[in-house]
Image: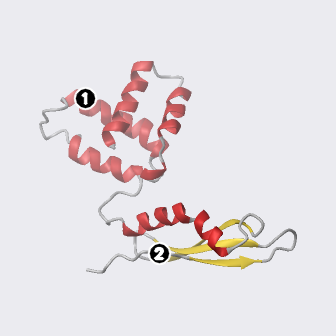
């Protein structure tokens, strides 16, 4: 088994035609199939971050996120769609009796997931979905009653 690698990335200073030079942070992102892709992010100008050390401090939290993705086990779902599929397989199996959910509840949850939740949130990374964004989405749905919106919220919580 390969040891997980911690990425530090690297900085380069790029001159611009207009304005001051900028610090560019670069790192590799490994996809689900194992292929490596170079990524870059303009951190700021040399006026904002006069030294490379100050630029490193600016990307410290970004490095944690990058390495979280790198160190994440392959079995952990990356997208909400994958998490939802796992939830449906384990919790909403209509053939398997459950102590927690009845047959009609399972059918309702599956319908809401298929028609409302996964079409809206399926392509988002699990870590990108924020509670405030879900609340805004629920508030923008006009064709459902408040109790149905509450069920949507409870389903999303249950999936997590």
Crowding at dot 1, Cα within 10 Å, few <14 / some 14-19 / many 20+, comes out as few
* Placement of 121 over or under 102, stated as above or below: below
In this picture, residue 133 sits left or right of residue 80: right
In this picture, residue 109 sits left or right of residue 34: left
Considering the numbered disc 1 on the image, is that residue within a helix, a strand or a loop?
A: helix
129 and 79: which one is in front? 129
* Placement of 108 over or under 19, stated as above or below: above
126 and 44: which one is in front? 44
| Residue at the spot 44% in from the left edge and 36% down from the top edge | 116
Q: Position of residue 146 (x, y in %)?
A: 44, 19
| Residue at the spot 54% in from the left edge and 32% down from the top edge | 136
* Placement of 9 over or under 151, stated as above or below: below
Q: Position of residue 90 (x, y in %)?
A: 21, 46
The residue mark sitting in front, 1 or 2, is: 2
The residue carrying mark 2 is: 7
Name the residue furthest right. Answer: 18
State which tag comes first along the sequence, 1 or 2: 2
| Residue at the spot 40% in from the left edge and 23% down from the top edge | 148
Quadrant of the image occupied by residue 97? top left
Quadrant of the image occupied by residue 15? bottom right
Crowding at dot 2, Cα within 10 Å, few <14 / some 14-19 / many 20+, comes out as some
* Placement of 77 over or under 148, stated as above or below: below
Dot 1 and dot 2 residues touching (CB under 8 Å): no
In this picture, residue 82 sits left or right of residue 13: left
Label 1 to label 2: alpha-carbon separation: 45 Å
Q: Position of residue 128 (x, y in %)?
A: 49, 50
Coloration of the structure image: secondary structure
Image quadrant containing the C terminus: top left
| Residue at the spot 35% in from the left edge and 57% down from the top edge | 77
Image quadrant containing the N terminus: bottom left
Mark carried by residue 105:
1
Q: Position of residue 8 (x, y in %)?
A: 50, 75
């Amino acid at each position: 088994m390969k040891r997980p690698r911690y990425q530090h990335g690297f900085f380069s200073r790029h001159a611009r035609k207009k304005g001051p030079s900028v610090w560019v942070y670069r790192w590799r992102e490994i996809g689900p199939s194992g292929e490596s892709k170079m990524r870059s992010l303009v951190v700021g100008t040399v006026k904002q971050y006069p030294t490379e050390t100050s630029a490193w401090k600016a990307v410290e939290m970004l490095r944690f996120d990058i390495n979280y993705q790198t160190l994440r086990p392959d079995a952990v779902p990356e997208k909400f769609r994958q998490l939802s599929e796992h939830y449906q397989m384990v919790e909403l199996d209509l053939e398997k009796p459950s102590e927690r959910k009845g047959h009609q509840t399972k059918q309702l949850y599956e319908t809401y997931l298929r028609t409302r939740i996964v079409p809206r949130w399926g392509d988002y990374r699990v870590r990108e979905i924020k509670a405030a964004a879900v609340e805004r989405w629920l508030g923008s749905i006009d064709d459902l009653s408040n109790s149905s919106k509450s069920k949507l919220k409870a389903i999303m919580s249950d999936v997590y």
